[in-house]
Image (cartoon, rainbow, N blue to C red):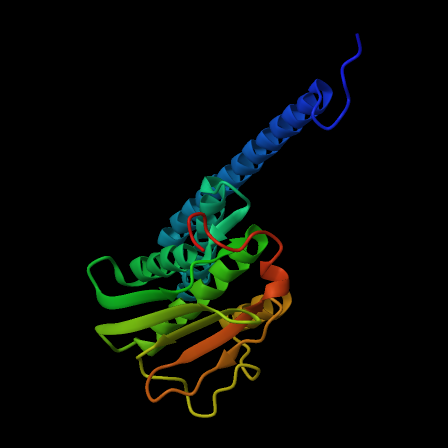
Amino acid sequence: MEKRTGPNGPAAEEREQALAREIRVKDALIHEVHHRVKNNLQTVESLMRLHIRRCPSEEARSVLVEAARRLRSMAIAHEMLSEATKEQVDAIELARRVSQQVKTSMCGDSSQFCITVTGTPRLIPGSVSISLALVIAEITCNSFEHGFAEETQGNVNISLKQTEKGLRVTIGDDGCGLPSGFTIQGQTSMGLTLMRTLVEDDLRSELEEVATPIGACFTFEIPNLILNEQNQTPEGEQ
């Protein structure tokens, strides 16, 4: 006797079960890929740090330190993706992990510098998370390296706010502020060039400096067109 092929028949049920198995296998493979990428990035970072300790050139050490920090930020994004149930991560948690990692690497755990992350819980696609992690790391590093260069304490505030058009990311500090006449487009340093390129090319936005009474502040808005590639809201949130 042939199996019924209607929408509720055994054949349809078998197809659904086969599809569910394929999805589980695909998810497991994706998680494994992110896990291995994270491990590989951490291995490369460790090798870089070995070279940093042995490098006689201060300029070369500085370049390697920056490269190692960027690898660590990418590894954090891949680690979160390997833990996720879908190919998405919470932007708030990503910002928190990345910024704290920058603080620890530059100031240590016992420093008097404080990082505050606030905003709207929002799941973002994996491709967005890696670029966002790098931008957050670059701006946060800029605060510690330049804004707090001669300070023993300070605050960095990171805000991720949902708007009608997308996710507004604002990162500011209460340090010494930007140099007189500073413009983002006029900068040629590796860090600012990378920030601008990631925001414009990967996140389809524009990096802007915000006028503030003290410190420095940057903002950009990731459009919904990119964010809506997958479901937006973290599990359990409305």
Residue 124 at least partly seen: yes
Q: In which quarter of the image is the N terminus?
A: top right
Residue 13 sits above or below residue 160 on the image: above
Between 74 and 12, the one nearer to me in the picture: 12
Q: Quadrant of the C terminus?
A: bottom left
Q: Residue at x 71, y 21 (%)?
A: 9
Task: Indicate left or right for 57 with 190 as reference.
Answer: left
Task: Indicate left or right for 54 with 14 as reference.
Answer: left
Q: Residue at x 39, y 68 (%)?
A: 140
Q: Position of residue 22 (x, y in %)?
A: 64, 29
Q: Where is residue 200 in the image (x, y as percent from the top left)?
A: 61, 70
Task: Indicate left or right for 10 with 119 as reference.
Answer: right
Q: Where is residue 186 in the image (x, y as percent from the top left)?
A: 56, 84
Q: Residue at x 55, y 71 (%)?
A: 164
Q: Where is residue 188 in the image (x, y as percent from the top left)?
A: 55, 77
Q: Which residue is drawn at 45% across and 69% down?
A: 161
Residue 220 sits above or below residue 2 on the image: below
Q: In which quarter of the image is residue 64?
A: bottom left
Residue at the right extreme of this rendering: 2
Residue 202 at least partly seen: no
Between 99 and 230, the one nearer to me in the picture: 230
Residue at the bottom extreme of this rendering: 181
Callout count? 0
Between 108 and 76, the one nearer to me in the picture: 76
